[in-house]
Image (cartoon, rainbow, N blue to C red):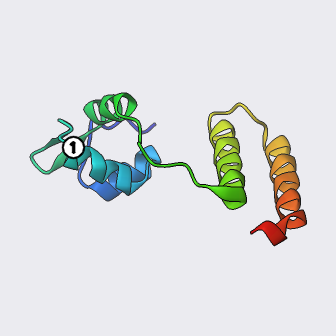
């Protein structure tokens, strides 16, 4: 049984283990997150900082952006265990089909 780590040795390992983009990890370091000490990234302070300082990215505009946001939202619900895999697949299929029907907008 693997034990829970207290720190990561690199930004890449933190990104992979926490399923957070490396850009978010870099933003945390750049903006002074206290999780970065002695060449390590400490998990709890990083997660607290990220929760407190949610990404300020701008939403994508237009039909492509709406489709992307819907797919991202659906993936997050699946990752959180709120949607079963069969339901997730069915919803993704419908979203993609809808996107294809309106491809002239893309």
Could you tell me residue 84's position as x and y percent? 79, 37
State the residue at coordinates (9%, 46%). 38
| Label 1 crowd bin: few (<14), some (14–19), many (20+), radius 10 Å | few
Q: Which residue is mark 1?
A: 31
State the residue at coordinates (86%, 64%). 102
Horizontal side of 4 relative to 64 (left or right) equals left
Quarter of the image that includes the C terminus: bottom right
17 or 77: nearer the viewer: 77
| Direction left: furthest residue | 38
> To which quarter of the image does residue 96 belong?
bottom right
Could you tell me residue 20's position as x and y percent? 44, 48
Could you tell me residue 91's position as x and y percent? 84, 47
State the residue at coordinates (61%, 55%). 61
> To which quarter of the image does residue 36 belong?
top left
44 or 59: nearer the viewer: 59
Horizontal side of 13 relative to 62 (left or right) equals left
Label 1: state its secondary structure.
loop
29 or 86: nearer the viewer: 29
State the residue at coordinates (67%, 36%). 77
Q: How many marks?
A: 1
Could you tell me residue 37's position as x and y percent? 12, 42
> To which quarter of the image does residue 103 belong?
bottom right
Horizontal side of 102 relative to 15 (left or right) equals right
């Amino acid at each position: 049984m693997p034990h829970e780590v207290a720190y990561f040795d690199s930004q890449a390992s933190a990104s992979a283990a926490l399923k957070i983009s490396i850009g978010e990890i870099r933003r945390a370091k750049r903006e002074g997150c206290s999780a970065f000490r002695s060449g390590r990234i400490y998990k709890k302070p990083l997660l607290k900082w990220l929760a407190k300082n949610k990404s300020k990215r701008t939403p994508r505009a237009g039909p492509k952006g709406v489709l992307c946001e819907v797919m991202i939202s659906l993936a997050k619900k699946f990752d959180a265990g709120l949607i079963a895999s069969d339901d997730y697949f069915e919803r993704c299929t419908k979203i993609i089909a809808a996107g294809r029907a309106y491809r002239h907008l893309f």
